Image (spheres, rainbow, N blue to C red):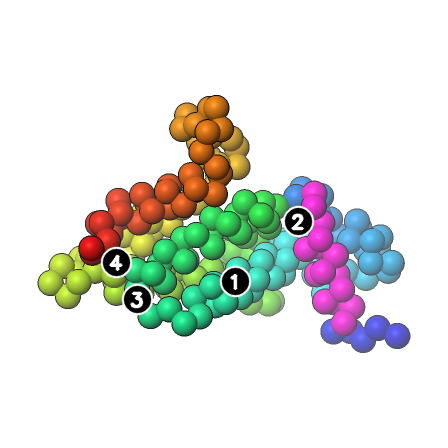
């Protein structure tokens, strides 16, 4: 017999699977109930609104992305290397988990100030990610040339990464950079990420 906690987790897991395979548009309380094998009203006990359900699914995405960052950054100490890993893992996650990635940053769909919720707001998952990025950006700048507003630099850096991932997903960057496919995708992506780092932080020290 399922406990209340395990049933809630099962509903979230079904939602995660739907988002990963079919996108956020496929996620609904009734469809999740059907796939979880429970009554159509059961999800309402845990997720009173569609927004609260999507937010719980998105938080799972943030947890997975954080786990990827931690594993990839293990053993590194250089702020520049850490930021490079952050950038590559962020883009890789966007390309591998498209449905989840698109959902995670759609705050107008989730439990932002527009949508009341008794649970933790999604901003509590988003802000630590951004704060980590701000700290890495600040550390990458030398003491002699600190960024006046590291949060602004970090926001611009994040925007560039996010745009890179979206344009690559849509095929736009392949079209304009290498229409004949002469350069492997992985090599091209690594170069683009390196260019984003250099554009916002300056070239790496020799």
Q: Residue 9 lies in magenta, yes or no?
A: yes
- Calculate the distance from the C-alpha at mark 1 to the C-alpha at mark 2: 17 Å
Which circle marks residue 20 in the picture?
2
Residue at the spot of label 3:
78
- Calculate the distance from the C-alpha at mark 1 to the C-alpha at mark 4: 24 Å
Secondary structure state at the residue bearing disc 1? helix
Position of residue 113 measured from the top left corner of the image (x, y, whole percent): 50, 56
Callout 2 touching callout 3 (CB < 8 Å): no
Residue 114 seen anywhere in this rendered image of the structure: no
| Residue at point 74%, 67% (across, down) | 8
- 63 to the left or right of 15: left
Secondary structure state at the residue bearing disc 4? helix
Q: Nearer the viewer, mark 1 or mark 2?
A: 1
Disc 1 packing (10 Å; few <14; some 14–19; many ≥20): some
| Residue at point 43%, 42% (across, down) | 187
Q: Residue furthest left?
A: 144
Residue 120 seen anywhere in this rendered image of the structure: yes
Callout 3 touching callout 1 (CB < 8 Å): no
Q: How many numbered badges does the structure rendering display? A: 4
Q: Nearer the viewer, mark 3 or mark 1?
A: 3
- 68 to the left or right of 197: right
Position of residue 68 measured from the top left corner of the image (x, y, whole percent): 52, 62
Position of residue 23 measured from the top left corner of the image (x, y, whole percent): 66, 43
Which circle marks residue 68 in the picture?
1
Point out the tag, 3 or 4, that comes first from the N-terminus: 3
Point out the tag, 2 or 3, that comes first from the N-terminus: 2
Q: Is residue 77 above or below residue 44?
A: below
Which circle marks residue 150 in the picture?
4
In the image, the segment drawn in magenta is 6-22
Q: Nearer the viewer, mark 1 or mark 4?
A: 1
Secondary structure state at the residue bearing disc 3? loop
- Calculate the distance from the C-alpha at mark 3 to the C-alpha at mark 4: 18 Å
């Amino acid at each position: 017999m399922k406990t209340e906690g395990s049933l809630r987790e099962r509903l979230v897991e079904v939602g995660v699977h739907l988002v990963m395979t079919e996108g956020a548009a496929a996620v609904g309380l009734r469809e999740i109930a059907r796939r979880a094998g429970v009554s159509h009203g059961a999800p309402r006990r845990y997720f009173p609104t569609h927004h609260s359900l999507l937010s719980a699914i998105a938080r799972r995405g943030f947890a997975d992305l954080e786990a990827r960052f931690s594993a990839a950054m293990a053993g590194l100490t250089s702020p520049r290397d850490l930021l490079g890993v952050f950038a590559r893992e962020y883009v890789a996650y966007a390309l591998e988990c498209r449905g989840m990635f698109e959902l995670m940053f759609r705050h107008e769909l989730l439990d932002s100030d527009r949508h009341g919720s008794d649970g933790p707001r999604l901003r509590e998952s988003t802000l630590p990610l951004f704060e980590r990025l701000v700290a890495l950006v600040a550390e990458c700048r030398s003491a002699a040339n600190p960024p006046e507003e590291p949060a602004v630099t970090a926001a611009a850096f994040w925007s560039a990464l996010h745009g890179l991932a979206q344009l690559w997903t849509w095929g736009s960057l392949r079209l304009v950079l290498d229409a004949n496919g002469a350069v492997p995708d992985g090599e091209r992506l690594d170069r683009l990420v390196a260019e984003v780092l250099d554009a916002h932080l300056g070239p790496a020290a020799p």
